[in-house]
Image: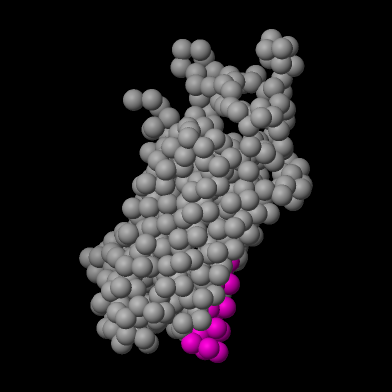
Amino acid sequence: MPYRYVIVGITAVAALWLYIDRVCFSTLADPIQKDVGITDEQKSYMLGAFFFTYALFQIPIGAMADRFGARAVLTVSIAGWSLVTAATGLADSFAALLAIRLMLGVTESGAYPAAAGLIKNWAKPSERGRFSSIVALGGRIGGFLAPLLTAWLAVNLAGIGPSAWIGNVSGVNWRGVLLLYGLCGLAVAVLLWLMVRDRPPSLPAVSEPVAVPDTAGEWHAMPSGPGASTQAPPTFVQSLGSLIRSRNMWFFGALQFGVNLGWAFLVTLFPSYLKEVFGLPLEQIGLMQTVVLGIGCLGMITGGVVTDMLRKKLGPKLGRSVPIGIALGGCACALFLVPVLPSAWLVVIVLGMMAFLVDMHNPSIWSFAQDVGGKNVGAALGFGNMWGNLGAALSPVLLMAVKNAVGWDVVFVVGGTAFAVAAACGLMLDATKPIEPETRNEPEARATG
C-alpha cells in the first residue's frame, strides 16, 4: 500500500478528534452550566467564543504550517487542543470556561490548513479531491459521533475523574469525559508525529513527484524533498501579502463566508425552527437533526471523486469551479424551497440534500487551495476558513434577528441568497492562477531548458 494512504488515514483520524473535541462541549453545555453556575447569556458567549478565535488564527497558524512544516504544526495543534479539552474538565468558573473556549479556537485553527499542506505534498493533483474528502469526512464522522459518544460516556463514567472531588450537582460526569477526550487526543498527536512526514523522501526508489503548474495551467512532475527548491519558506507577512493581492482569494473568502452563513443554520437554529413551526418533541428533533447531518456525510464521500473526475475531463480551471458552483446553487434552491414544504420530514429531506451538496463541494475547496497555494497552502486554506467561520459566527445572530423581525420564511430566503452569492463566487475561481508562481531552482531549470 502506498505510504501516502497511511498519511491520509492518520490525518483523517486527527480530523475526527478535532470535531469530537469541538462538538462535545455543546452536548455537555447544560450540565456544565448547572455545575459551574452560569447564566444562559454567559453560556451563549462561551459557545460563540470558539468561532471568534478559530477564525482569527486561521491565517497565522496556516502560515506557520507553510513555514515550519505541516507535521510539526499539526502535532502541536492536536496536543494543544487536547490539553485545552482536558483542562475544561477542571474549570469551575465562567471566566475559566470562557478563556478555555477562546484557547480551543486558537489551538484548533491550524488543523485543516496544516492538513491541506500535507495532502498537497503527498497527493498527485488527480488525487487531491479524494484525499481531501477522506480527511474532511473524518471530521464529519467525528461531529456525527460526538453527541452519541459523549452522552454514553457521561452516563457510564460515573464517579471517575475530577467530578469525584470537584463535584457535579447535575449528576453528569462531564469532567471525566473531557479528561478522557484530552488523553485520547494526546495519543493521536504522538501517533501523527511518529508516523507522518511533511513530504515524500527524495530517494529515487521511494520518491513521489510533486506536481507544479506551468503558465498554461498544466501540471508537471518535479522532485520533492531536500534540494528540490532553493526558495525559503514564506514569512507570515509575505503570505498575507500574497493572499491580499490575489483576486482568487477574495472570491474564495466570500464563497466560504456565504456558505457558512447558510449552513450554520443546521447546527444552531434548526432545532428551534422544528419546535416552533412543527411543535415537535426534543427526541424527534434530535433524530431529525442527526438525519440531516448524516446525509451530509455521504456528500463528503462522493465530492472528492467528482472533483477529480471533472478536473480530468474539464481541465484544472473548470474542474474545480464547476462542482463548487453547481453544488452551492443547489443549496440555494433547497433553502428557497423550504418555506412551502408542508411537513417536517420533507424539510429534513430537503435540508439533508443541502447538507449533502455542502459536503460534496468541500473537497473541491481543499483541492483549489492546494492547486493555487504553492508554498502558501496552509495560509490559503486558512484565509478561506477565516471568512467562513466569521460567517458561521454571524449566522445565528443575523438569522435570529431576521426571524424575530419578519418570521422563519425570510430566514430561508436570506440563507438561500447567501448560497447564491457563494455559488457565483465559486464559478469565478481559477485554479490555473497560483497565488505566487512556483519556481524551480537554477540547476533544475538549466537541466530542463
Residue shown at the point (58%, 72%) measured from the top left: 394
Q: Left or right: where does residue 44 sit relative to residue 272?
A: right
Q: Left or right: where does residue 78 sit relative to residue 152?
A: right
Q: Is residue 197 above or below residue 188?
A: above
Quadrant where the C terminus is found in the figure:
top right
Residue 432, located in which quarter of the rendered image? top right
Residue shown at the point (76%, 48%) measured from the top left: 245
Quadrant where the N terminus is found in the figure:
top left
Residue 258: image location, x then y, percent? 57, 64
Residue 57 vs residue 101, the one in the foreground: 57
Q: Residue furthest left?
A: 156
Magenta-tinted stretch: 391-407
Q: Residue furthest bottom?
A: 405
Residue 43: image location, x then y, percent? 49, 79
Q: Is residue 266 above or below residue 445?
A: below
Residue 43 vs residue 403, the one in the foreground: 403
Residue 115: image location, x then y, percent? 51, 43
Residue 373: image location, x then y, percent? 63, 40
Residue 222, located in which quarter of the rendered image? top right
Residue shown at the point (36%, 47%) measured from the top left: 301
Residue 280, located in which quarter of the rendered image? bottom left
